[in-house]
Amino acid sequence: MSQEKITIEVDGQALEAAPGQMLIEVTDAAGIYIPRFCYHRKLSVAANCRMCLVQVEKAPKPLPACATPVGPGMIVKTKSQYAIDAQKATMEFLLCWRPARSQPKPDRRYVGS
Ligand code: FES
C-alpha cells in the first residue's frame, strides 16, 4: 500500500507531506522553525498555548500549526507580519497573565526578624 503525498507551500517553499499530517511536523522536517510551548512530537496535541499561530491562506484567522492538518495546495506563511503579530499577541497575553498567578508569597521566616 503506497501513501500518497500532497504538496503544500510554506514561506514560498514547496514541501511534500502526508495527507492529514500536522503542519508543525512538516515544517519541523523541513527545518522551518515555528515557535511553540505546548507541542512535543511524543505527546498528544493539546494546542493550548497558541504560540504556534501561522497565517494560512483563505483561513479567516491565524491557525495553530500543531493542530492544523495539511491539505493539498495549502499556502502557509510563518514569518508574515500577520503571523508575527499573532505570535507576539499570544506572548504578550501569556506574560500579562502569568505573574499575577505565580507570584511567590513572601517567606515569613525572613521578614521582620
Ligand atoms: S504549540 Fe501550543 S498551541 Fe501549538
Image (spheres, rainbow, N blue to C red):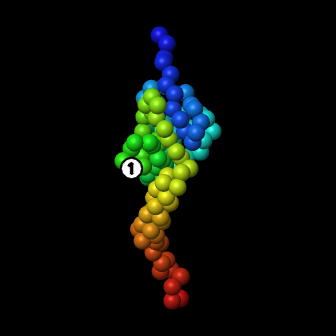
Residue at image location 52% in from the left, 28% down from the top: 7
Looking at the image, can residue 64 be seen?
no
Q: Nearer the viewer, residue 48 or 77?
A: 77
Mark 1 belongs to which amino acid?
Answer: Lys
Residue lying farthest left? 60
In this picture, residue 112 sits left or right of residue 32: left
- Where 26 sits versus 98, above or below? above
Residue at image location 43% in from the left, 31% down from the top: 71
Disc 1: which residue: 61
Q: Residue 69: which quarter of the image?
A: top left
Q: Is mark 1 within 8 Å of ligand 1?
A: no
- Where 44 sits versus 1, above or below? below
Circle 1 SS class? loop
Q: Nearer the viewer, residue 32 or 39?
A: 32
Q: Nearer the viewer, residue 46 or 93?
A: 93
Q: Position of residue 3 (x, y in %)?
A: 48, 17
